[in-house]
């Protein structure tokens, strides 16, 4: 398994979570290694424009959208799979036909959204096998994708948002499964089982 080295601060905790599941993973920006991996994870914490600059510098902006093995985007990784992000008006990878939009705050709902939020499954998907709908997952973000045809799970802030998506061989979560206790570990195990 390849974890794309996109500079995200969550890579160490993600690697530890995968090792606990018995996964053999390598952190890399090498195109050949990524292409040959059985599974690929695009993690991310930070800004969309910076994330895209890192992918361009590594020559991965054409590689990632063309991957055919299971790919999991996490948090900023999901935004980078979209067409664009309102954050710094960044053009992204174009896998998901959507744009990441800034969350709107409301009384009791600050931005960034940080903490445990309920995730409701809206479509059957193997990513959620063995996970009850309305389970809680850990979020840290200021931008989100709208609910769309690729949405397989939603969550609420001031408005509904995509908590998990699926499009072809690409799945993605707005939340951090590596920080989401038993439900997150199950989701990562489900991703590892995808072929």
Image (cartoon, rainbow, N blue to C red):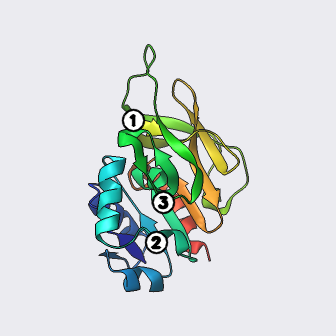
Which quarter of the rendered picture does the N terminus lie within?
A: bottom left
Q: Which of 39 and 61 is in front in this view?
A: 61
Mark 2 highlights which residue?
62
Q: Nearer the viewer, residue 35 or 98?
A: 98
* Above/below status of 14 relative to 76: below
Dot label at residue 170:
none
Circle nearer the viewer, 1 or 2? 2
**Residue located 49% across and 75% down the image:** 39
Q: Mark 3 or mark 1, which is nearer the start of the sequence?
A: 3
Q: Nearer the viewer, residue 115 or 147?
A: 147
- In percent of width and height, residue 126 lies at 66, 62
Q: Do the residues labelled 1 and 3 touch (CB within 8 Å)?
A: no
Q: How far apart are marks 1 and 3 (CA)?
A: 19 Å
Q: Which residue lies furthest to the top in this view?
A: 107
* Above/below status of 28 relative to 50: below
* Above/below status of 64 relative to 187: below
Q: What element carries label 3?
A: loop
- In percent of width and height, residue 52 lies at 36, 57
**Residue located 38% across and 23% down the image:** 110
Q: Are marks 1 and 2 in contact (CB under 8 Å)?
A: no
Q: What element carries label 2?
A: loop
- In percent of width and height, residue 93 lies at 48, 60
Dot label at residue 93:
3
């Amino acid at each position: 398994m390849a974890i794309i080295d996109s500079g995200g601060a969550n890579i160490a905790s993600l690697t530890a979570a995968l090792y606990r599941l018995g996964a053999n993973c390598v952190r890399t920006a090498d195109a050949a290694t990524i292409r040959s991996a059985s599974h690929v994870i695009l993690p991310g914490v930070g800004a969309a424009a910076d994330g895209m600059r890192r992918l361009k510098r590594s020559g991965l902006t054409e590689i990632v959208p063309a991957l055919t093995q299971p790919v999991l985007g996490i948090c900023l990784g999901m935004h980078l799979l979209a067409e664009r992000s309102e954050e710094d008006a960044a053009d992204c990878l174009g896998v998901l036909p959507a744009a990441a939009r800034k969350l709107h705050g409301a009384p009791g709902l600050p931005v960034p959204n940080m903490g445990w939020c309920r995730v409701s499954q809206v479509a059957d998907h193997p990513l959620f096998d063995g996970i009850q709908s309305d389970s809680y997952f850990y979020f840290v973000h200021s931008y989100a994708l709208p609910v769309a045809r690729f949405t397989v799970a939603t969550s609420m802030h001031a408005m509904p948002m995509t908590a998990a998506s699926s499009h072809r061989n690409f799945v993605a979560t707005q939340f951090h499964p590596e920080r989401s206790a038993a439900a997150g570990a199950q989701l990562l195990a489900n991703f590892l089982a995808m072929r």
